[in-house]
Image (cartoon, rainbow, N blue to C red):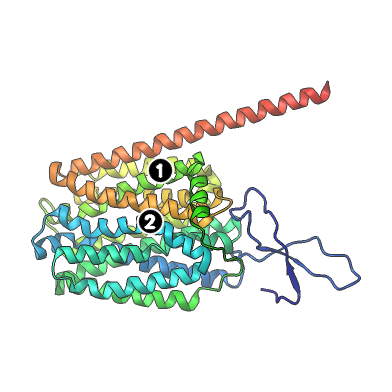
Amino acid sequence: MPSASTTASIPVVVGADSPVASDSNVTYPAEPVGRAASAEPVDTRLAPTSPGFRRMSFALFAAGMAAFALLYSTQALLPAISAGLDVTASQASWTVSAATGALALFVLPLSALSERFGRRTVMTYSLVVAVAVAMLVPLAPNVGWLIALRAVQGAALAGLPASAMAYLAEEVRPKALVAAIGLFVAGNSIGGMSGRIVTGWVAQLWGWRAALAAVALMALVCAVVFRLLLPKARNFRPGTLHPKALAKTVGTHLSDPLLRRLYAIGALFMTVFGAVYTVIGYRLVEAPFSLPQGVVGSIFLVYLVGTASSAAAGKLVARTGRRGALYLAVSTTTLGLLLSLSDSLTGVLSGLVLITAGFFAGHAVASSSVSHTAKTGRAQASALYQSAYYLGSSVGGTLGAMAFHAGGWEATVALGLLAVVGVAAITLYGTRCARVERRSFVVAGAGRAAVTKS
């Protein structure tokens, strides 16, 4: 970044296509005395060709890995936890739902702190506390303590997702934003996959407590990498903590019809994902599959599909538009749910591949659309999305386990299909609203032209 002696930062309003419309991240180079001031702005945000872009991407990729590995560390272990602590599937599922539910509750307050103390600082402390709690989780004496520690861990992780989205919106140029967020989401998928695979095999050899300790060590490494590589923010402007102003910003976002639809889409997609991956382990350890714990953990290799689909979300949006990409994500997820009803392991795995691809693509599109839509209070806009998203995970995990206990895998799939229908209905409504708005614009333009001619 140019030194203060050579540039003078002037706040400007960026075009409507930018997700950072009110930031002072465009500077105008100062000219020597006696020469006309330059009118050409210098954008300090990172582009894919910028020197710090790769470091930033890898740092947030590592943070995403740590977050998802910790957040869902017990999910692949639920059958082992049920057996080890002598609890039901519904009770064990709370070790996942408590973490995601706490994250949903705390993401908005911690995002407000990031507006005052900085995205980088809040993300760092979030990871430090979450990793520290992860060291204690394997020592939980009973399911009550395990659920409580997991809730604290989820609350700590709440500072990461919304702050990361806001950091990207401020530090990355608009055309590269979807791709950058896609890479962060890809880190989520790699973390979720690797955490589940590690826990599966370690649990088979040494038990579920050792498996949770292994995830804690993996997250510690990721946290160190994140802190060492993430560039300092160049476009962050600290604000003040005013509860009334925060409430007003939140109210503004919730009154925006497009943002409300995006929040609902994120929640419903995550309801499907939470239900499927909370219950799938129980299904695969039972007949007709009867797979061992290590093999069940390896099933999560299908997360690699999510890594690819989220990273490719930017290209998909460029070709089909945001709503077109959402329609494709809905279709893919629906087909995957139906395939997973098969009693063939190949059919189930094929279904999981499609569910994972559809979910991660839909999530990347919806989350980047929030950053694109919100012109002010981006951290709060992203925080509301994350709250809805993880609330969907908590509800999906709990309801999915209850449905499985009551009616088997078919009931869990029915829950997922209901959520997918909700996403389709919201997207169709958004398409209709866009057409009506476009038609009104054309009619208004024709009316102005007629008046001009007359």
- Is residue 310 something that shows in the picture? yes
The relative height of residue 108 versus residue 208 in the rendered view (above or below) is above
The quarter holding residue 136 reads bottom left
Q: Which residue is drawn at the image coordinates 57% and 58% (left, top)?
A: 176
C-alpha separation, residue under disc 2 versus residue under disc 1: 21 Å
- What label sits on residue 264 in the rendered view? 1
Q: Which residue is drawn at the image coordinates 19% and 63% (left, top)?
A: 77
Outermost residue on the top side: it is 454
Residue 301's spot in the image, x, y percent? 30, 61
The quarter holding residue 302 reads bottom left
In the image, 89: left or right of 136? left
Q: Which residue is drawn at the image coordinates 30% and 55% (left, top)?
A: 101
Q: How many marks?
A: 2
Q: What amino acid type is highlighted by mark number 1? A: Ala
| Comes first in the chain, label 2 or label 1 | 1
Q: Which residue is drawn at the image coordinates 48% and 51% (left, top)?
A: 247
Q: Mark 2 — residue?
A: 306
Residue situated in front as seen by the camera: 10 or 116: 116
- What label sits on residue 361 in the rendered view? none
Residue 205's spot in the image, x, y percent? 15, 73
The relative height of residue 225 versus residue 254 in the rendered view (above or below) is below
In the image, 45: left or right of 178? right
Residue 294's spot in the image, x, y percent? 19, 66
Image quadrant in which the C terminus is located: top right
The quarter holding residue 200 reads bottom left
Report the mark closest to the observer, 2 or 1: 1
